[in-house]
Image (cartoon, grey):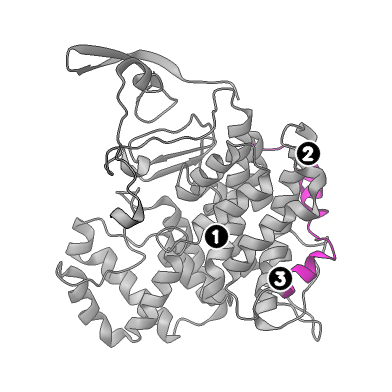
Amino acid sequence: MTSKMKPNGSAKISIKDKTIELPVYSGTVGPDVVDISKFYKESDHFTLDPGFTSTASCESQITFIDGDKGTLLYRGYPIDELAENSNFIEVAYLLLQGELPNEEEYQQFNHNITYHTMVHEQFKTFFNGFRRDAHPMAIMCGAVGALSAFYHDSTDVTDQRQRVVATHRMIAKMPTIAAMAHKYTVGQPYIHPRNDLDYTENFMQMMFAVPAEKYEINPVLAKALDKIFILHMDHEQNASTSTVRLAGSSGANPFACIAAGIACLWGPAHGGANEAALRMLEEIGDVSNIPEYIKRAKDKSDPFRLMGFGHRVYKNYDPRAKVMREACHEVLDALDIRQEPTLKVAMELERIALEDEYFVEKRLCPNIDFYSGITLRALGFPTEMFTALFALARTVGWIAQWKEMYEDPAQKIGRPRQIYTGAAERRFIPRAKR
């Protein structure tokens, strides 16, 4: 990757009797950054930034977020335009290569992904080591990590051709593995992928088809799921993406790096938000109970919080939620299930959040997790599969970020520092004298 940062002056930090001058750089859009990479060497001081919320760990040309304006761009393209006009494979190519493909490039990339969707037959026996009631994310953590044992011919990160093959394999096999994890936990036979279906349709038939009858794919439902995948593909340097980059900085193979990302995504504060939102709707139970829960949500002394409203990054409306809301209502209409109790609660909560002065003032709009949870439930996915679907979609972003990290000549092995507050140096005392 060729750096596109532009010099934009300098910043000075005075510590005791010494002044340190640090370069300032500008990106294409967004705030300028102060380069502190040589700060320790010149000042003998570290900077402290818990959670790295004010620190840029890398230069990236993939995704841009402006939380105040409610903007999300993939390679410069607004997320809503991509979700409405493109499809999973085309956006995956964009994230990986930097530009939208022409027809020939699209067909070739689609072919490469389609013909890598099957997994090694011995891979199926690997699943037998899990308990039958294992969480799909637990299975995916282990299964994806195990890919390096089955496909060791594409684990040499110094070989450009092997990196490409690993990329295709990872994106292609993730829906197969996710569907196998589901089938394993419900005790149904695995369904093989089909080369005549597109990426999302193929995943749906592997998830829901059974050998005893023909599975019909509803195009409205397939399009909604495709949008969910596009909307979740990448989201800048979040916890799981940073984990993938950190693991990759050591030279670890891409299968291991993605397994690390899946483990991080599993955390309820990250990938489990849509699952938490749906569980909240189930807890509320009935529309008649909503006023009580709204009252509790407004009470600062009450630990209850409305899940699926507001966002850590987006202080305006989540741009992904706008697309997801439309897709959600299209699915509900296509299935004619608006009267289902949980969905009735969701629709009434949505109405209140968009009209109630308290929610409007605090910008607690329904976010993508709120709508995606409702939509995935309507599509027939069990709640425990929600985060696995997130991992499936985010794999593209993780791979793109890993690829960019590896090709960045400025990248170093990750090594955050700390401020130590433990015991000072002391001498060992024999046990008998303590």
- Mark 3 sits on what residue? 180
Residue range (magenta)? 100-128
Q: Position of residue 280 (x, y in %)?
A: 36, 76
Residues at discs 1 and 3 in contact (Cβ within 8 Å): no
Q: Identify the mark nearer the N-term, 1 or 3.
A: 3
Q: Position of residue 11 (x, y in %)?
A: 28, 16
Q: Quadrant of residue 20?
A: top left
Q: Identify the mark nearer the N-term, 2 or 1.
A: 2
Q: Amino acid at mark 3?
A: Met
Q: Gap in Å between the C-alphas at discs 3 and 2?
A: 25 Å
- Mark 1 sits on what residue? 390
Q: Residues within 10 Å of mark 3 (few under 14, many from 20)?
A: many
Q: Examine the rendered structure and indicate whether residue 35 appears above or below residue 280.
A: above
413 relative to 348 in the view: left or right: right
In the depicted view, which residue is nearer to us: 95 or 85? 95
Whether residue 205 is visible? no
Q: Position of residue 129 (x, y in %)?
A: 71, 73
Q: Amino acid at mark 2?
A: Gln
Q: Gap in Å between the C-alphas at discs 2 and 1?
A: 26 Å
In the depicted view, which residue is nearer to us: 81 or 432? 432
Q: Which disc is residue 132 wearing?
A: none
Q: Examine the rendered structure and indicate whether residue 168 appears above or below residue 150.
A: above
Tell me the quadrant of the picture where the N terminus can be found.
top right
**Front disc: 2 or 1:** 2
Q: Identify the mark nearer the N-term, 3 or 2.
A: 2
Q: Residues within 10 Å of mark 2 (few under 14, many from 20)?
A: some
- Mark 2 sits on what residue? 162
Q: Amino acid at mark 1?
A: Phe
Helix, strand or loop status at disc 1? helix
